[in-house]
Structures are given as structure tokens and as C-alpha cells.
Amino acid sequence: MAKYTSDYKLLIPKLDLSVEKNTGRVPSDNKFHVVYKGNIVASYHSKREAEERFHQIVEESGYKPEPIPDKVVTPGEETIDRYFQAKDLFWAEGPKYRPRGGKGR
């Protein structure tokens, strides 16, 4: 099992909900603390347990993240994207098919 010795923070600012370890808001005891609205709700030795509690609070609150707006792609941009993808593929795959050998081949 991996040991987490550095700082850690998982945050949803709109809920003021976070999982923190060794930050200024929580004690430096190498535990993962679930902080909700400025108060430490729970502390765990394992990151997995802390994240499970974090997700449980998110579900209980009914929080839904805002959808990311779709980018409208114009036909010109699509053509340029296709060109760059084809160029990248050519240079990535091209050397596989070059003739090999030396004298006498």
C-alpha cells in the first residue's frame, strides 16, 4: 500500500467540502480529514475511506456540477484538426515501414 507523506487536497469549492492532509486547515497528523463548511467531519488513515465519505456527502447534498459548454467546431477547424492528426500519425507510424538493410539487400 502506498504511503502518502505529502500534502493532499480534494475540493469542491461550491460546497465548501474537501479532503485534506497536512494543510493549514487540518492538523499535521498524517490523516486524511474530511472538512465540510469549515468543520472537520471525519478523519481517516486511508485516502480511500476519506474519499468514500467525501462522495457520500456530495450525494447527500444533491450537488450536480455545472455542465461544460460544448465547443462549436467550424468546418475549417475540423479540416485543420484532421490534417494535424494525419500528420502526427504519419510521423509516428512512418518509420516502421521504411526499407531496412544495407549492402546486398
Image (cartoon, grey):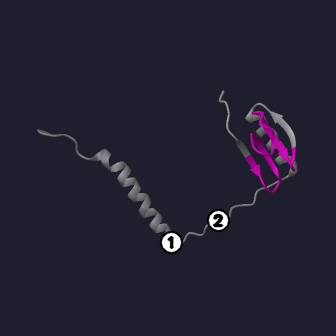
Q: Where is residue 80 drawn, in percent x and y?
A: 45, 67
Q: Secondary structure at mark 1?
A: helix
Residue at label 2? 70
Q: Which numbered disc covers residue 75?
A: 1
First along the sequence among labels 1 and 2 = 2
Kindly report the distance in space between the C-alpha atoms of the residues bearing marks 1 and 2: 16 Å
Image quarter of residue 88: bottom left
Near-viewer residue (6 or 83): 6
- Which image quarter holds the N terminus? top right
Q: Where is residue 30 drawn, in percent x and y?
A: 75, 33
Q: Which numbered disc covers residue 86?
A: none
Image quarter of residue 90: bottom left
- Residue in view at x 86 percent, y 42 percent: 40
- Residue in view at x 73 percent, y 45 percent: 9
- Residue in view at x 74 percent, y 35 percent: 48
Give the residue type at disc 2: Asp
Decide: few, some or many residues near mark 1? Use Cα within 10 Å; few <14, some 14-19, many ≥20. few
Give the residue type at disc 1: Pro
Near-viewer residue (9 or 61): 9
Q: Is 104 left, or right, of 32 in this rendering?
A: left
Q: Is 73 left, or right, of 96 in this rendering?
A: right
Q: Where is residue 23 drawn, in percent x and y?
A: 75, 43
- Residue in view at x 72 percent, y 61 percent: 67
Q: Secondary structure at mark 2?
A: loop
Decide: few, some or many residues near mark 2? Use Cα within 10 Å; few <14, some 14-19, many ≥20. few
Q: Which of pointers 1 and 2 indicates the residue nearer the eye?
A: 2
Image quarter of residue 51: top right
Q: Is residue 38 magenta?
A: yes
Q: Range of the magenta residues? A: 10-39
Examine the rendered structure and indicate whether residue 30 appears above or below residue 40: above
- Which image quarter holds the C terminus? top left
